[in-house]
Amino acid sequence: MQPPSRQDYVSLSLPGLESGGYNNSKQWRRQSCWRKWKQLSRLQRSLILCIVVLLFIFGLATYPTVTEHLRGLGDGEQDTDSKDIPGPTFPPLLPEPDKMAQSALPEQTSQRKLSTESRPVLHNHLQRRGNASEVVAENKAAVVKEDLEEGVTGSWHGPLVDTNQATGGAKSKEKDDSPDDQEAKLPQDSASRLEEVRQAFRHAWNGYKQFSWGHDELRPISKTYSEWFGLGLTLIDALDTMWLLGLKEEFEEARAWVATELTFDKNVDVNLFESTIRILGGLLSTYHLTGDALFLDKAKDIGSRLMPAFNTPSKIPYSDVNIGKGIAHPPRWTSDSTLSEVTSIQLEFRELGRLTQDPQYEAAVDEVMKQIHKLDGKQDGLVPMFINTNNGQFTHQGVYTLGARADSYYEYLLKQWIQGGKKDHQLLEDYLQAIEGVKKNLLQKSSPHGLTFVGELSHGQFSPKMDHLVCFLPGTLALGAHNGLPADHMDLAKELMETCYQMYVQMETGLSPEIVHFNMHEGSTRDIEVKLADRHNLLRPETVESLFYLYRFTEDHKYQEWGWEILQNFNKYTKVPSGGYTSINNVRDPEYPSPRDKMESFFLGETLKYLYLLFSHDPDLVSLDQYVFNTEAHPLPIWPTAA
Ligand code: DMJ
């Protein structure tokens, strides 16, 4: 078959395509422009030429400014990729200090200004002061120096109530003269900070009162409530906070509800641990603070109704009790109880026993401690996370953490020892051994800044994972040091306190996630990583709790400043306008932290209480030499020692 001849095609005559090809089209455009130029009048051509010349002259005159401006922007772009910025999967955390200052300058692009304005003012302490090991070295040096000056060798003694200090006559033990500390010690308005906490409490309380009065927890977004035990949990947890904050009106209305509405004669299952620390602990402490027998009566009622939990083959209590029927049981899926749960009810039951003179309460909880003291399966004083209620043996052995399911075991070893007048050597030994176990097995430093953190151990394998819950530990270590335990406990408390603060400061909202992972390998660009599933914040208290202890014992105002930042960020990201505060899903997204629609009772019982005590300059407002706080922040008296 013959190929079709040229004439068989329909010829489309497009200018510039006639000779085919891209180059010819360019040529066509040039010719066409020239034709158009020639068609213009002489006057039109002169005008256009004048404009072009003027533009050229103007361009030359402004050349340096424009290039400088462009260079400036270019530098900014480059810095975004600098070594201080985290790896490719995560957005930048914090600009360096000089860049933070620059970001406030008017020359910055509007986009950059916007993102800066939408963030809270965050201070990265490590970036301000150099690297963490320098900070640690400074702290240690200060302590050693002071110990030498004071002749203290074996233990650390924080300032107790010292009249000299009150008049400004004596130098506090932990004071140093670093510029940062001087900055932090500038006169500050403690009264207005206390008022700010009161306002936060009132806001939380108003939400609870409007939408969930008499129920367990507020759901502030949907303006309703959730029920856990159906016992007015938030109201009871918050009683002593209201008393301490001087919120008399609110306290009186809550008291009236306890007097007329609260009944434990209900067919409900409650968790032994949670109802002991929140309800029994809350009622006992309110009784002690107010002297009002109503609260003692209610404490006796709930305490006696919880006792069936101890009727197990091993005497290790079940996790749940039906307080109406007097029947206890383990969770449906196991006969195990959680370690922290069975070992963090002792302060409350011992105190109930002392007040009622009924020996059954103390005997029941002491038995648990005695058994655990003797059990095999610990590693250097660290305990597994579960215990079987039938045979009284540890289960799921080989996993050790200071976080969820074990945390308050360690806290209550020390606090029971303090509660009982520091006489029970077994408790003290177990505590000291456990802290040595933490140092040996769980303590590591992060990279690049050398933050000290407490990881986890699983069958000999170390994991650099730390729950926010672990941030109770700096406070507990400091409390131990204050009570005469080794000085290095206080050093460690300060290091861990810094780490817990960094868990807040390094997040875009300035609020800590529930769990963090620390980088340990050389060349890491940042210390803290957060997994997607761990980005929530439940308004937890542990960090502000520890800040309170550290401030009480050191009088270093930086701890108050850190707590102040945290309160402001709670206000910024978790406060619900119609009333209440909400836990959030994402501490890394300041634009949309994503409310979870729940205000936990411990926000009123613990978080706001510890913030208030932190900002107070009065060491006698719940003196730590007279009271010991239970794990839900309810102060119980340290027992008077027999003469
Ligand atoms: C509280 O109920 C107690 O502090 C408990 O020991 C741990 N969990 C919450 C607060 O985070």
Image: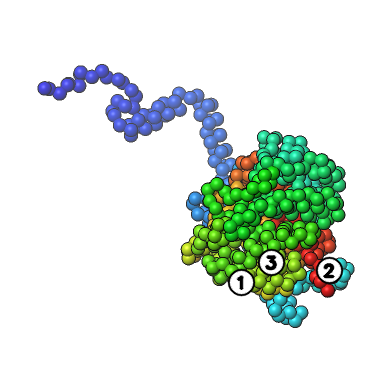
As rendered, which of 177 and 16 lies closer to the eye?
177
The mark tally for this picture is 3
| Sequence order check, earlier mark of 1 and 3 | 3
Task: Please determine whether, in this image, residue 231 is positioned above or below residue 396.
Answer: above
Tell me, yes or no, if residue 176 can be seen here.
no
Tell which residue pokes out farthest to the left in this image: 1
| Sequence order check, earlier mark of 1 and 2 | 2
Secondary element at tag 3: helix
In the rendered structure, which amino acid carries the disc numbered 1?
Gln
As rendered, which of 550 and 592 lies closer to the eye?
550
In the picture of the structure, the residue carrying the numbered disc 2 is: 161
Where in the figure is residue 525, as x and y percent of width and height?
A: 52, 59
Using a 10 Å C-alpha cutoff, classify the residue at mark 1 as few (fewer than 14 neighbours), some (14 to 19) or many (20 or more).
some
Res 298 label? none
Answer with the quarter of the image where residue 115 lies: top right
Using a 10 Å C-alpha cutoff, classify the residue at mark 2 as few (fewer than 14 neighbours), some (14 to 19) or many (20 or more).
few
Left or right side of 427 for 89: left
**Contact, CB < 8 Å: mark 1 with mark 2?**
no
As rendered, which of 643 and 460 lies closer to the eye?
643
In the rendered structure, which amino acid carries the disc numbered 2?
Val
Q: Residue at x 65, y 63 (%)?
A: 367
In the rendered structure, which amino acid carries the disc numbered 3?
Leu
State whether label 1 is within 8 Å of ligand 1. no
In the picture of the structure, the residue carrying the numbered disc 1 is: 433
Q: Residue at x 42, y 29 (%)?
A: 34
Q: Residue at x 68, y 41 (%)?
A: 267
